[in-house]
Structures are given as C-alpha cells and as structure tokens.
Image (tube, helix red, strand yellow):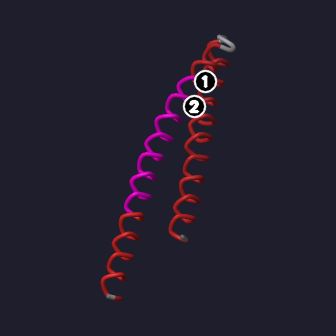
Amino acid sequence: MKENQSLAKGVLMYISFSVLGPLLTIGAIGYVLDNIFGTKPFMLLGSVLIAYVLSNFLVFKKIKEFNASLEKIEREAKKESLDEKEENK
C-alpha cells in the first residue's frame, strides 16, 4: 500500500511540474516575443497553445507509465499471495 501512495505522490508532483513548467517557460518566451515584435497577444496565445499540447503529451506519457507500475505491483501482490497459500497447504 505504501508503494501505491508514494507512486501516486510522485506522479502528482510530476504532473504538476509538467503542466506548470512548460506553461511558465514557453508562455514567458511568448510574452517576450510579443513585446519585441509588438504582436500582442498573438505570440503569447500561440505559446500557451504549444505549452498546452506539450503538457498533455507529458501527462499522458506519465499516466501510461503509472498504470504499468500499478499493474506490476498488482501482479507481484497476487504472486506473493499465491506463494503464501501454497506454503500454508
């Protein structure tokens, strides 16, 4: 159970940073480009759109890894319970 909780906390932290990181960095680049080229708000909106796509890619990739880890933990737990049952017989 502790493995599941620590795994979930790690995924939550990763997802938080994978959403905020690209949004803040790419958004800041778009903001600066808007000020340089005088194209407000188009560069900022475009950079936010790019950050959104990148964030979703990173989140879906991490969720796929998380599901694989959960399945592995479940298989190991089932194997351990079967081994215990065989030993008790």
Question: Residue 72 lies in what quarter of the image?
Answer: bottom left
Judge left or right: residue 82 versus residue 41: left
Question: Residue 28 lies in what quarter of the image?
Answer: top right
Position of 13 relative to 42 (above/below): below
In space, the residues marked 2 and 1 are separated at their CA atoms by: 6 Å
Q: Position of residue 17 (x, y in %)?
A: 59, 47
Q: Secondary structure at mark 2?
A: helix
Question: Residue 81 lies in what quarter of the image?
Answer: bottom left
Q: Secondary structure at mark 1?
A: helix
Q: Position of residue 52 (x, y in %)?
A: 56, 29
* Observer-nearest of 73 and 52: 73
**Bounds of the magenta segment:** 48-72
Tell me the amino acid under the disc marked 1: Gly
Q: Position of residue 11 (x, y in %)?
A: 54, 54
Which image quadrant: the N terminus? bottom right
Magenta region includes residue 4: no
Residue that appears at 39% across and 53% down: 68
Residue at image mark 2:
26
Residue at image mark 1:
30
